[in-house]
Image: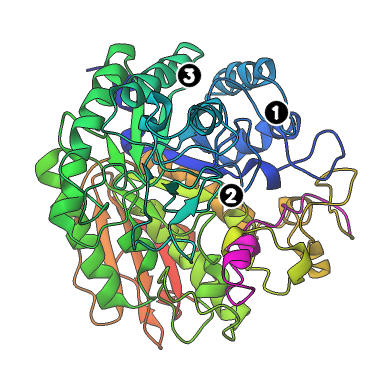
Amino acid sequence: MRRSDTWWRGAAIYQVYLRSFADGNGDGVGDLAGLRGRLPYLAELGVNAVWLNPWYPSPMADGGYDVADYRDIEPVFGTLGEAELLIEEAHALGIRIIVDVVPNHSSTESAWFREALAGGPGSAARERFWFRDEPGGWRSIFGGPAWTQAPDGQWYLHLFAPEQPDLNWDNPEVHQEFHDVLRFWFDRGVDGVRIDSAALLMKSETGFEDLDEVHEVYRGWRRIADEYGGRVLIGEVWLPDQERFARYLRPDELHTAFNFDFLACPWDPEALRRSIDQTLATHLPLGAPPTWVLSNHDVTRVVTRYGRADTSWDNGARRDGAPADLELGHRRARAAALLAMALPGGVYVYQGEELGLPEVEDIPGELRQDPIWRRSDGTVPGRDGCRVPLPWSGEHPPFGFGAGEPWLPQPGEWRELTAEAQDTDLGSMLNLYRTGLRLRRDHLGDGTLTWLPLGPGVLAFTRESGLTCVVNLGPDPIGLPPHDRVLLASGPIEGDALPADTAAWIYAR
């Protein structure tokens, strides 16, 4: 198999939450024009691919994850023609494009669901969804009941918001629809698909998570991806059981999946070492590359998390508003970035991570848009705080994001974190990422590691290239092992002493 066909094995993939990346037409919402204008920034950053959250027509009840039509682009973002230009322009810069597909549910505004409502009980159109005469007892992942009553009295299932009716994967029409959707985007040059809530598709009387039948779905998808060559299927699979998780990565299923265990780890050497070892042990027998993720559009930003007393992550206990030492969190986030980039496999960077953005926790309630906020009656802030539009330049909001007022407010103190402010500062988070990703292309990516015993509180390993990564998670400085030069460090180093909460890449001939 050609190396280009397995580009994803060691790729650095940048996640674009399109609404918040860059606004090209001044309406306050990020769009394809804004993203196309910032492609040179991403090329300079050094990423191999861009993964976009859903860009399809949608009522935006859940930020685009309520998809109304997979064969077009949400007008707020642009047009299908612009999407095709984006793919072409990104490829010209050596950047591949990954799109988001949401197979668990649709939208109440989709043609299929409107047809189901019109068709009434017993119609073939309703067999594409989960309609019942009586509601079940399942609870929505977003809070509240998972069943909503249609005007004619039947109830339909939605594991997320009521505007996101679950599809019935026992119906062959659903399988065929998504096969056609994959081909639609692969034919337009898309290089991969990220699969939302990948373990939830199949349902039974007893449950809906990780049922065995779901694997046949992805075997069918894999056959299609293999027809095109060089395409990747990436699963969002939140499972605590590593053996069950590994089943999604069998050679005839998904190519890779997000490593949420690593993301959720506290800033603790034993916990991180355990997660890394378990990840490598899970993936090695399958020949699948691990992935390393610090944050995404659903998770409190890493600078804030690492500045808290409890640095772990739990979807069910977000610890919103817990005090955070942002200076400490920033220092740890820099070290964590070098750790994640040095590990074997692929690495993901969520937009703004390279700028060191913290979580925005003081968004006024009337401006919040996450359905979690609404369905919890304002008791759970939700995910808007990690989705605030990026600061590009200038001293005041909207910080170059666009000409109009952004759809979520930006903090005034972000003036020090704009891409422009960090561009020429060699010690900035932005330049740490730029240098790290450049060195990663030459020295790291796919492969294996060899651990070095440097004592408690320290994670240290060597890669095939000879590069050694040392991360000091202890309270006191440590001595670096013998080396010829320091390639990169997350913070200042005095002599050969690596300070606490600091990482270094060193090289010895």
Q: Residue furthest left?
A: 285
Please state which amino acid type lies under the numbered disc 3. Trp
**Which stretch is magenta?**
373-395
Identify the mark nearer the N-term, 3 or 2.
2
Identify the mark nearer the N-term, 1 or 3.
1
Q: Residues within 10 Å of mark 1 (few under 14, many from 20)?
A: some
Q: Residue at x 29, y 40 (%)?
A: 256
Q: Residues within 10 Å of mark 3 (few under 14, many from 20)?
A: some
Q: In terms of depth relative to the viewer, which is nearer, 64 or 502?
A: 64
Measured in 3D between alpha carbons, the distance from the residue under mark 2 to the one under mark 1, in whole angstroms, is 24 Å
Q: Secondary structure at mark 2?
A: loop
Residue 137 screen position, x and y as percent:
34, 63
Residue under pointer 1: 36
Q: Quadrant of residue 368?
A: bottom right
Magenta run includes residue 310: no
> Is 100 left, or right, of 474 in this rendering?
right
Residue 83 screen position, x and y as percent:
63, 21
Q: In terms of depth relative to the viewer, which is nearer, 163 or 89?
A: 163
